Amino acid sequence: MIVQCLNRSNQYDDIEVKSVTDYVPSHCFSLHKPLGKKKDSPYYIDQFGTFDIETTSRTRIEKDDHGEEVTKPIDAYMYVWSACIDGEEVHGRYWKDFLVLLDKIQAYYKTNESRYFVIYVHNLPFEFSFMIGYLNDYSEVFATGKRKPLVWRLKKRGIELRCSYKLTNMSLDNFTKKMAGCQHIKAKGDLDYSLIRHNESYINPTEWGYIINDTLGLWEAITYMLTKDKDTIATVPLTSTSYVRRDMKRAIRKGTTTRLLKKKLALNDKTYKLLKEAFRGGDTHANMIKCAKIYHDVYSFDASSMYPAMLLLMQFPVTAFEKMPVTSKCLKYIKSKNLAWIAQIKLKNVRLKEDQYNPYLSISKCRNLQGCDPDNGRVWKAAELETTVTDIDFSIIEECYDFDRDSIEIIEDTLYTARYGYIPDDVRGVIMEYFTAKTKLKIAVKHTTPNSKEREEAEYDLMKAKNKLNGIYGMAATDPIHPIMIYLENEWQEFSYARYENDIAYKEKVDASGFKIPDEKSITEQSEKSVLPYVWGVYTTAHARKHLRRILACAESSYIYCDTDSCKATNFNFDKLTELNNWIYELCEKTNTFVDIDGKKYYIGYFDCESDVKSENRYEPEYKDFKTLGAKKYCFNAYKETKDTTYFGCTISGVKKARGVEVIKNLDNFREGFKIKNSGGYQICYNDSDTITKVKVTDYQGKEAITEYTGYSCMIARDYEIGLSDDQIKNYTIIDEIAE
């Protein structure tokens, strides 16, 4: 079969696609060195494949208890699959065909438990749910969480399926476009997923092109990536952050400071619990007073590489946390010694200061919360609360709230202190290497011709540098204690060491599954094994929230919205902003945290204007019009290069940007109660059965056929209704009353 596949030039190439019956592996191959240094690490064939399925989800409309129509799943099944094996395209309509393909791969490459052929699947969790019922014979699944398989080894077959989405952290569309050596990018819109199909349904040439593009493009993109990064199937990391982990491990092995610090900073049960409780992500919030209103000429400032900047510019705990007795003067003593600290605290009569517009305390992080007036998930005021904080969090709370100072209570046996210091040079060196690469590549991109091969190459390198730079924080913030997930008896279970040791039947089932049991380690041992100390991840986000407060202070009462590293406001105190940036530049000089290129210094962590408007003025508004309805929920008309041209955009959590723009269209429609049909996301309903079910299906053309499935993931197109929380509605009413 000859199929026309879309290429980078937006033209179509003729690609031969073989049936399983006609396919015969024909290329020479060799073995790669074992992955890792363990003696039992398997060998890998130097060739690889890609795999993808197309499915039909059948649903029905029911009415809920309120009389509203809701969509419910019936079932889901695969009706066609495609694979690209070392550049050759193969297709099939049934799972039995795919099993034949695996048999042919095993026979040709002589794969077994110590010799694997790798097949990449771009969303392995999805395909896994359909395949597990057919391939659950002595397989080993390495998962990052429930229904999140990363690697799936079919041990008797010597086949290893890997998730390429986790490797790239990009959609297939973006991945194929960004890989300059990928000739066949993902097609769009050529396959209508709403139509009912089955294994005998007619697939037209355009639809075949769409299907084949997915596996061919993925194979080409991964091939280019391996070549570009000088990797092999045996050495390429499993996830995008693993690249950073690899570089960091190499740097740490060369020195001694970080290795010694990791031992010092290893956690015990108590300190791990406190840090886990204190950990928070970026600060995202909308000014309650300014919600649901349109503002004009809105500025936007964001911090350059916020998290890496905090790691380089700020100080972190560099000694073990030690318990400190709680006394009336302990906080004063800690402050005089400039110590880092964590503790559980109790506050009374808490209320947001009049000159503050961004409440800091998160309701989800509070305990024993009494008499609370909320503001979109934050504490506006409360009669009493308990929470766990770092010293940085407490300084923000003091800046943000008034409360009864004489009633501050530190919960007994929860106060721990450590000494501050800068992170070691071996870690700093890796971050600076990434920052330098990113800076130089940004300049290089500007000096290449648009749409040229050189531009594509530079953009790829820049993307990798950015991902690596941002990945440093993620490595530090990774929870060192995470459950071990195992797929057992057709369901995801958290593996239990205690049960394995004491329950004979459970032990036999685990052993029969092929699951390789890791050694049991204590919290201290597991935290010590982390590439970077978990405490640095906790403090990175705390420093970032403090840094964000500095730009909020420059916005003053005009602040509208903030998110992690950015602030949007109708006006800024530019003198104060200049002072802030000068302070950051001084920190960069003090810590030698800058890149010098041809006599020009490039700094990190400073706040820059995001506007695309080019003018003689240093700062220009980014948005002509801006409106927010809460966290992760705003729309705008943004300036494009000049103030004469604008474009409409939106950011709504749960709605794809393109779909939001298409449906909402303008700021007037962006209001409570506005409904977005098929918002771009899907609700997924799972069936984990391993029993083969046969059903008679009539497709969209009226053709009947028997199809089958075991487990599945049924995708239901998700609708979205723009709304406000109850506390938002209440608070807006209060504000309106005050205004009157």
Image (cartoon, helix red, strand yellow):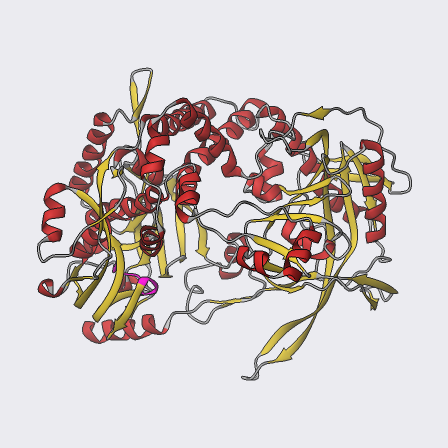
x, y percent for residue 226: 62, 28
User: From this viewpoint, is residue 617 visible?
Assistant: no
- Furthest residue in direction top, as rendered: 598
**Residue 79 sits in quarter:** bottom right
Image height of 432 relative to 117, above or below: above
x, y (%) of residue 8? 66, 33
Residue range in magenta is: 359-365
Across the whole image, how many numbered discs are drawn on residues? 0
Residue at left offset 44%, top offset 50%: 481
Q: Quick check: 247 left or right of 414?
A: right
Closer-to-camera residue (92/426): 426
- Nearer the observer, 601 or 164: 164
Q: Which quarter of the figure is the C terminus placed in?
A: bottom left
Left or right position of 705 against 80: right
Location of residue 75 with respect to 609 vertically, above or below: below
Residue shown at the point (81%, 53%) measured from the top left: 95
* Quarter in which the N terminus is drawn: top right
Which residue appears at 23% of the width and 71% of the height? 735
**Which residue is more in the foreground, 381 or 612?**
381
- Is 275 left, or right, of 102 in this rendering? left
Q: Is residue 148 magenta?
A: no
Q: Is residue 732 left or right of residue 486?
A: left
Q: Is residue 235 visible?
A: yes
Specify whether residue 360 is painted magenta: yes
Residue 650 image point, x, y percent: 45, 54
Q: Quadrant of residue 121?
A: top right
In terms of image quadrants, where is residue 485? bottom right
Residue 314 place in picture, x, y as percent? 25, 37
Query: 180 or 399: nearer the eye?
Result: 399
